[in-house]
Image (cartoon, rainbow, N blue to C red):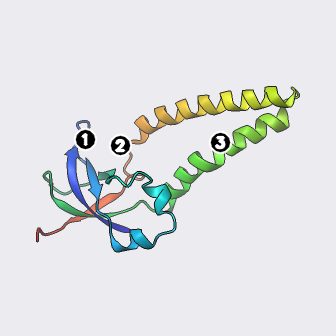
């Protein structure tokens, strides 16, 4: 999917990663998932990969990651947490309330793992949207 946005800052660790504020477009208002995508109605921003020379406030056209990135994110955010809780209920022989507490403890550890993983994956080109061209200023 293509998105239009504005470069708002540059990542200090890499010259290829920029932060882009995504502009609302007409399809956002028709989308059923808009409440989950931007629940606070603030400007959305994402980190994006670029090989184009850019400056702040440049308008850019981005492509969101392909199926590999979407599958990986879905697996980490939706499937794994449910699998952890189910595994604690199925595999442990403790009473239900103890299993539930242990499952939530494991979820806390998993969230900590996700925070560390996020810092590791921030520079991975295959997971970030890619800026494909600089839009002319109108």
> What residue is shown at x 84% (from left), y 38% (from top)?
90
Contact flag, marks 1 and 2 (Cβ < 8 Å): yes
Nearest to the eye among marks 3 and 2: give it: 3
Query: Mark 1 Cα within 10 Å, few/some/many (few <14, many 20+)?
Result: some
Q: Which numbered marker is on residue 81? A: 3
Q: Which residue is mark 1?
A: 11
State the image coordinates of residue 124 (x, y, percent, origin top left): 39, 46
Q: Nearer the viewer, residue 61 or 30?
A: 30
Considering only order in the chain, which callout, 1 or 3, is on the residue closer to the N terminus? 1
State the image coordinates of residue 110 (x, y, percent, origin top left): 60, 33
Q: Residue furthest front?
A: 40
Query: Mark 3 Cα within 10 Å, few/some/many (few <14, many 20+)?
Result: some
> What residue is shown at x 71% (from left), y 43% (from top)?
83
Q: Quadrant of the C terminus?
A: bottom left
Q: Which residue is mark 2?
A: 123
For the residue labelled by badge 3, is the local secondary structure a helix, a strand or a loop?
helix
Nearest to the eye among marks 1 and 2: give it: 1
């Amino acid at each position: 999917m293509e998105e239009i946005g504005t470069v708002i800052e540059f990542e200090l660790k890499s010259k290829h990663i920029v932060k882009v504020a995504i502009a609302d477009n007409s399809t956002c208002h028709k989308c059923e998932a808009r409440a989950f995508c931007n629940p606070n109605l603030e400007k959305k921003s994402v980190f994006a990969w670029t090989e184009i020379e850019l400056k702040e406030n440049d308008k850019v056209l981005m492509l969101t990651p392909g199926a590999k990135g979407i599958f990986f994110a879905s697996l980490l955010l939706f499937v794994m947490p449910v699998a952890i809780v189910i595994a604690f209920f199925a595999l442990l022989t403790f009473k239900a309330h103890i299993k539930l507490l242990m499952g939530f403890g494991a979820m806390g550890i998993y969230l900590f793992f996700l925070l560390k993983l996020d810092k590791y994956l921030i520079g991975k080109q295959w997971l970030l949207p890619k800026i494909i061209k600089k839009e002319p200023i109108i």
